[in-house]
Image (cartoon, rainbow, N blue to C red):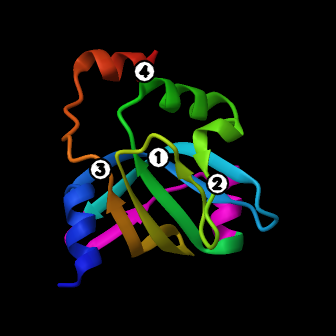
Amino acid sequence: MSDIDGTVRGILREGITETIVTTSSPDGQPNAAPMGIVRQGGATFIRMFPGSRTFANVTATGRLVANITTDPLVFVVAAFEDLDASYFLPQEDMPPLLRDASAWVYFRADVAGVVRLTPLTGAVISREVPAFSRGFAAVIDA
C-alpha cells in the first residue's frame, strides 16, 4: 500500500463521501460543485452529469480535487452559484483547493461512463473528525 492509498482511506470512507469537488477549466477558471466520491472495494469513482461545467473541466483536463469541509454554506452556495475567488487557494499545477477544507485529495480522472479516480496526492489539514448531524443534512437539503 502506498502512502497516498493510506491517505485516501483516511479521508474517504468506504461508500459515498460528500465533498466539494474543485476543477479548473483549460484556461484556469476555478469551479466547485458538491459531489459524492464513491469508494467501493479497491475502486474510487464519481458519477457526473455530462452537461455540467465540472464534467466539461474534468473531460478537458483529467484532474479534480475532492475537498472535505463541514461548512454547510459552502455546499449550498456551490450547488446554486459560482464560488467567488475568496473561497479558493489557487495552486500552480492542479485545480484550486477550498480555503477552509479540513482535508483534500487530488485525483487523475479517467472519463469512461463513470469517472474513475486515481489519487495523486492529498493532505489532512485538520485532524478533527467530522460527524454530520441531521441538522447539517437538513441545511444542505433545504
Q: Which mark is residue 54?
A: 2
Extreme residue toward the right, this view: 27
Which region of the structure is painted magenta? 40-59
Q: CA distance from mark 1 to mark 2?
A: 10 Å
Residue of label 3: 16
**Mark 1 and 2 residues: CB-CB less than 8 Å, in contact?**
yes
Q: Which mark is residue 141?
A: 4
The amino acid type, in three-letter code, at marker 4 is Asp
First of labels 1, 2 by sequence position: 1
In the figure, is residue 128 to the left or right of 123?
A: left
Q: Which of 28/111 is in front?
A: 28
Residue 95 inside the magenta-drawn segment: no
Q: Residues within 10 Å of mark 2 (few under 14, many from 20)?
A: many
Residue 57 inside the magenta-drawn segment: yes
The amino acid type, in three-letter code, at marker 2 is Thr
Q: Residue at x 20, y 72 (%)?
A: 6
Is residue 90 in view?
yes
